[in-house]
């Protein structure tokens, strides 16, 4: 089995497309915006209240979207290169 056939199978199994990659990256950016706009405070008992979980979640969405975009680009490049 060649690399491109394996890649097609992986991509088909994952079911991720360019549109879904854009949505993932948009969700990542939205996590950062929500984090920036959220209120952080220390209550009377000294407990910090903040939405820190949005930072790694945002990076996870951005990274996943970027990997899908890169994988799709490589697949298209290999496919076009073979057709020449």
Image (spheres, rainbow, N blue to C red):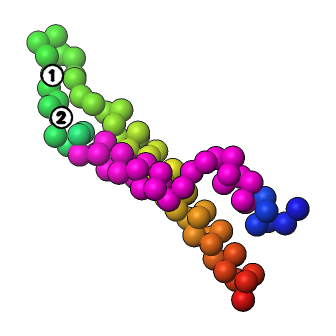
> Magenta-highlighted stretch: main secondary structure?
helix
Residue 67 in magenta stretch = no
Please name the residue shown 15% across and 22% down the image.
42
Q: Which residue is mark 1?
A: 42
The residue that appears at 46% across and 45% down in the rendered structure is: 60
In the shown orientation, is residue 24 left or right of residue 84? left
Q: Tell me, yes or no, if residue 73 can be seen here.
A: yes
Q: Residue at x 11, y 12 (%)?
A: 44
> Tag 2's secondary structure?
loop
Whole-percent x, y for residue 32 in the image: 28, 45
| Region of the chain picked out in magenta, as a range | 7-33
- Mark 1 surroundings within 10 Å by alpha-carbon count, few (fewer than 14), some (14 through 19), many (20 or more): few
Taking the spot 35% from the left edge, 51% from the top edge, the residue there is: 26
Residue occupying the far right of the picture: 1
Q: Which mark is residue 38?
A: 2
Res 59 visible: no
Badge 2 local density, few (<14 within 10 Å), some, or many (20+)? Answer: few
Q: Is 20 included in the stretch rendered in magenta? A: yes
Q: Is 37 above or below relative to 77?
A: above
Q: Quadrant of residue 71?
A: bottom right
Q: Residue furthest left?
A: 44
């Amino acid at each position: 089995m060649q690399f491109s056939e394996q890649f097609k199978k992986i991509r088909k199994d994952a079911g991720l497309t360019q549109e879904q990659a854009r949505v993932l990256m948009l969700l990542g950016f939205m996590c950062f915006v929500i984090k920036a706009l959220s209120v952080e405070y220390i209550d009377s008992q000294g407990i910090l209240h903040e939405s820190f979980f949005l930072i790694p979640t945002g990076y996870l969405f951005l990274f996943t979207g970027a990997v899908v975009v890169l994988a799709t680009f490589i697949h298209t490049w290999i496919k076009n290169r073979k057709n020449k």
